[in-house]
Every structure is written in structure tokens, then in C-alpha cells.
Amino acid sequence: MSLQPQRQILVIFPHPDDEAFSSAGTIRMYRNMGVPVTYACLTLGEMGRNLGNPPFATRESLPEIRREELIAACEVMGINDLRMMGLRDKTVEFEDDEKMVSLVKGLIDELNPSLIITFLPGYAVHPDHEATARAVFETVRRMPTEDRPTIYAVGFANNTIAEKGEPTLQIDVSSVKLEKVKALQAHASQTAWMIEENAKRVDDGRPMSDSWLQYERFYVINQDIL
């Protein structure tokens, strides 16, 4: 499906690399069209379990390494408005709900996005993912219907398709596959082993590197659905 025109895109995820796996191709394609994209990354992912493969980070150095990786990934995707929001990894779920709504509202009020890319509440697995998704959806829900941006929501829990059906939007990002791979590679402390392992796997007879990198899938939440 071709990309719908957008005025401004706001990407909100809690961790560096969330964007690379879920939507790097879509972001790059929109940037190629000249659409401004702001990425609000809530944490630096400083509690990430991986330290590189082979390890090249320590618990003390990981926050700065992941910050630099995030900047590099954004350069690949063409994002020149990166906001590091300063929350602590694995504690987003414990933040006050109204504080989170206020954070998201501030971004929406400033940027007036026509599209937000984030996780799908209830189907995002990690507690920080879920807290981020809830805050975004609650903020948009409180807005007048006519002012609400569209949401492209990423759901990947095992029960997502069984309960929500197939994603309503599938975007072929094969034209920017190289950039998506480079965005993933930029997050080397977390992704090096995944890329290596997935290259060895087969999905429907094709290497995973061919199938999981070609399409990005979203649940489209329009103004009147919330």
C-alpha cells in the first residue's frame, strides 16, 4: 500500500532500537518524501540485557553507547529531530499516568502531528512498551475527535493476530531495505546477534532477512476509533 500524505510524524517509543525493528523503513520512506519526523525516545535503554556480541559494553558504559547508537540510527533514517526524554529504562511502567499523558500532550501540542507511530496497548509485551502505548492512546483519546492524529500502532504479542486480526496496514519497505538494515546495525549492542541468527533462519521457505525486512505492519487507529 502506498504511503498516505502526512503533515508531521511523531514517533514515540521507550527504547533505542524499538523504532528500527518496527518502523525504520516507513520512517525513511516518509523522510524521502520530505515529511518532517520527530522521534521521542523515552529512555536510553540502559538496562538492556545485551552488551554486544562479543561483549564490548559494560553496565557503566552502556547508556552512552546506546545514546550514540540511537543518534547513528536516526541519521540513517533521516531523522533530524531526536528528543531523548530522559526517563529511566524499565521504570516507565511506574511513572505517574498523568505525568506520562502530560509528556505526550506537550509533544502533540508543539508539533501538531498528523500521524503518531507507537505500540499497540495490550499487545506490546514489555511493560515499558505498554506504558508508552497507554499514555499515547489516552492522550489522543482526550483530544477533540476532529483534532486527533492517526496512530500507526505496532502489536507483536503472540495473541495479537488471534485477538485483533491481521494488521490493517502493510507497507512494503523493500525500496529502503538497506537503510532499515543499517538502522538495525547501528544498534549493535542489542542487535548484532539477532541479525546474525535471523539470517540463518527460514520463514515460509525464505531467509528471514528477506521476509521480516520487506514489510512493516501496523494497526491503524483513526480519529473515531478511540
Image (cartoon, grey):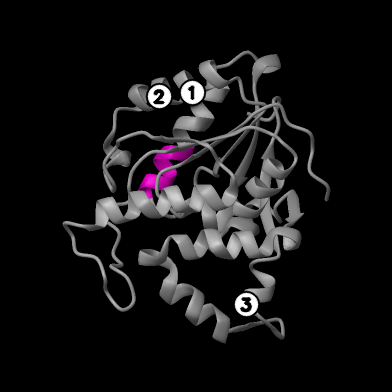
| 221 to the left or right of 143 | right
Which residue occupies 49% across, 81% down?
197
Q: Position of residue 175 (x, y in %)?
A: 75, 60
Towards the viewer: 1 or 51: 51
Tell me the residue that label 3 is attached to.
208
Q: Residue 199 at x, y = what percent? A: 56, 81
Q: What residue type is disc 2 on?
A: Leu
Element assignment for label 3: helix
Above or below: residue 121 compared with residue 17: above
Query: Magenta region's main secondary structure?
Result: helix
Mark 1 neighbour class, 10 Å CA radius: few under 14, some 14 to 19, many 20 or more: some
Which type of secondary structure does the marked residue at label 2 adopt? helix
Q: Residues within 10 Å of mark 3 (few under 14, many from 20)?
A: some
Which residue carries the number 2 mark?
103
Magenta stretch bounds: 127-133
Q: Are marks 1 and 2 in contact (CB under 8 Å)?
A: yes
Asked if the stretch drawn in magenta spans residue 132, the answer is yes
What is the residue that sits farthest to the right in this orientation?
2
Q: Earlier in the sequence, mark 3 or mark 2?
A: 2
